[in-house]
Image (cartoon, grey):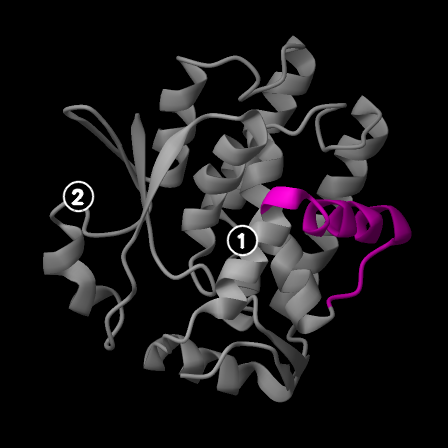
Amino acid sequence: MYELYIANKNYSSWSLRPWVLMRELGLAFNERLMPFSAGGIGANWDAFRSFSPTGKVPALKDGATAVWDSLGIIEYLAERHAGVWPADAQARSWARCAAAEMHSGFGALREYCTMNCGVRIKLAQVPAALARDVARLDELWSEGLQRFGGPFLAGVGFSAVDAFFAPVAFRVQTYGLQLSPAAQAYATRLLNLPSMQQWQADALAETWREPGHEAELAAAGSLLEDLRSQA
């Protein structure tokens, strides 16, 4: 059986991608949760290197085969299971482009709106770069929904492109990002998936706090609500 190594569900947007895809497609796996150490990525290097060549999460073990990076894991699964990418060629091409754009882009969204499922934040400011990222996100989601008919980005079924944007749905919720009605409805649709509800419940139950992530959160704006379990 697959083994999927992830970090704190409250913080780890990259871990969520393969986790939610495998849950939505019904692919069996054993979850291996490795909490972030205080001090950030560098502090995790030695521990995470035991399962990931980059010392980062997520990583997938399939017997003796190690697969790292969320995009690498998605493509590995796509070679073995139907439904990872849309069957329609045009939808599949669009979905791959959109997922790749999310994988390598949206830097301001990542910088100013780090993932934290368990809190609600009022942003101190919306810099121009963040506004551009949110506008592009809205444009991209609206295009996919209109072009392929929904309810997911590339058609009727949840696929890898939706998994890549699943962490953004949590960011929309955390920071109250403003979207068009169609894009907002899509974010809500993702948040209401049973798999996403389970991820959120697990995230809220975590009592770990990683100082680097918490500092990024404090810099983003004022805390409106903290729903996380306390140590």
Residue at position x 41%, y 49% from top? 15
Q: Is residue 59 left or right of residue 160?
A: left
- The relative height of residue 71 versus residue 191 in the rendered view (above or below) is above
Q: Is residue 114 visible?
A: no
Q: Nearer the viewer, residue 116 or 33?
A: 33
Nearest to viewer (mark 1 / mark 2):
1
Residue 206, image quadrant: bottom left
Q: What segment carries the magenta color?
A: 177-195
Please provide percent x and percent y for residue 91.
68, 18
Q: State the separation of the CA atoms marked 1 and 2.
A: 22 Å
Residue 41, image quadrant: bottom left
Residue at position x 56%, y 20% from top? 85
Toward the right, the furthest residue is 181
Type of the residue with mark 2: Phe
Q: Secondary structure at mark 1?
A: helix
Please provide percent x and percent y for residue 43.
17, 69
Q: What secondary structure is the stretch in magenta mostly built from?
A: helix
Any magenta on residue 184?
Answer: yes
- The relative height of residue 196 versus residue 227 in the rendered view (above or below) is above
Q: How many marks?
A: 2
Q: Which residue is mark 1?
A: 199
The label shown at residue 51 is 2
Type of the residue with mark 1: Trp
